Amino acid sequence: MKQRTIATPTTTVGIGLHSGRKVTLSIKPAPVNTGIVFVRVDTQERAHVPATALAVCDTRLASVIQKEGVRISTVEHLLSACAGLGLDNLLIELDGEEVPIMDGSAASFLFLVESAGIVEQEALRQFLVIKKPIEVREGDKLARLEPFFGFKLDFTIDFKHPAVDKTGQRFIVDFAEHAYRSEIGRARTFGFAHEVEALREMGLARGGSLDNAIVLDEHRILNNEELRYEDEFVRHKILDAIGDLYLVGHPIVGAYIAEKSGHALNNALLRTLLSDPSSYEISTFTESKAPAAYSQESQPLFF
Ligand SMILES: [Zn+2]
């Protein structure tokens, strides 16, 4: 199981969900063992901000990472696409603070990277294998990782909103059997109209619209188009979790179980994991010994 990067550089332009500003995103190949590193090309020294769990500095509206005061905001959908495509090493250049929101899902990033192509590199992938259960709780919220030879996520939501709660509240995805691209990658972010108004008053959510989010008022969905999945809300929470978990810096071999979790609890989970070296080990796999979720033979499923 080799490390992977993008074959050729690729660029797109979008707007930041919160800033509403136009931002150019370029994804470029990087050498083995680089990991995923964001580069702020609008700073004088082209500041590099590695995508790591310990770099997360704000989780209130999105996952934000920083290094020496330079911030990259809303990294989770792009990192989710990177995890789904099995990419280990990338330089991701931005000329602003926020990763563009695109259509609110990971679909545009998947298309961008797949159009550029993916190449294997001359080093083995390093997996993080969960060795014992780790969990964090906050009130009635839970996030947990436990040993499992593969990659499986089990997420339950409970929004107490008629339009959300009539859709599926729980989704379990085992990537030995399901493909990221078709089952998760197209699920859009969502927000509630009264919150959007409050955010706008704080100068946030300026780029948010019905083109890049499912927006709900007190009773119903305001978008004219149909949901992309009948349980799109919980699937988006899984999309977010996959991106948040990828901040651990390795593909995870284990099962993730969450109830009403979000960016803050996902990050607390990773920090708890990393603070206990007996809870995980870093392993490489030959093709025949790799978990099915990650093996090349089942590539059409996970990737
Ligand atoms: Zn999201």
Image (tube, rainbow, N blue to C red):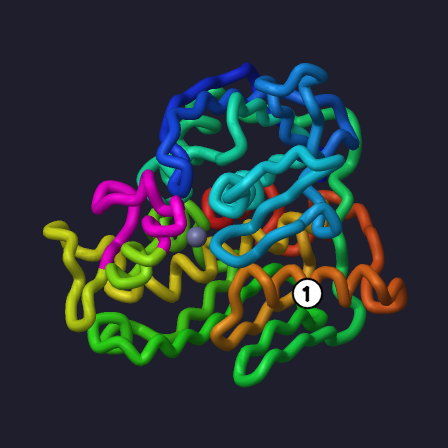
Q: Which is nearer the eye, 103 or 85? A: 103
Picture coordinates of residue 37 (x, y %)?
67, 31
The residue tagged 1 is 268
Residue at x 54%, y 24% (from the top left corner):
94
Q: Which is nearer the eye, 129 or 99? A: 99
Q: Is residue 74 above or below residue 153?
A: above
Q: Is residue 210 magenta?
A: yes
Specify the quadrant of the image occupied by residue 66.
Answer: top right
Picture coordinates of residue 277 (x, y %)?
88, 63
* In the image, farthest residue toward the front: 201
**What is the tally of numbered marks visible in this picture?**
1
Residue at x 40%, y 57% (from the top left corner):
236
Picture coordinates of residue 49 (x, y %)?
69, 33
Residue at x 75%, y 30% (from the top left corner):
34
What secondary structure is found at the residue carrying circle 1?
helix
Q: Is residue 187 magenta?
A: no
User: In which quadrant is the N terminus drawn?
Assistant: top right
Specify the quadrant of the image occupied by residue 121.
Answer: top right
Q: Is residue 91 above or below residue 162?
A: above
- Identify the amino acid type marked 1: Ala
263 vs 214, left or right, is right
Residue at x 41%, y 45% (from the top left corner):
181
The segment highlighted magenta reads: 199-215
* In the image, farthest residue toward the bottom: 140
- Residue 67 in view (yes/no): yes
Q: Is residue 52 above or below residue 27?
A: below
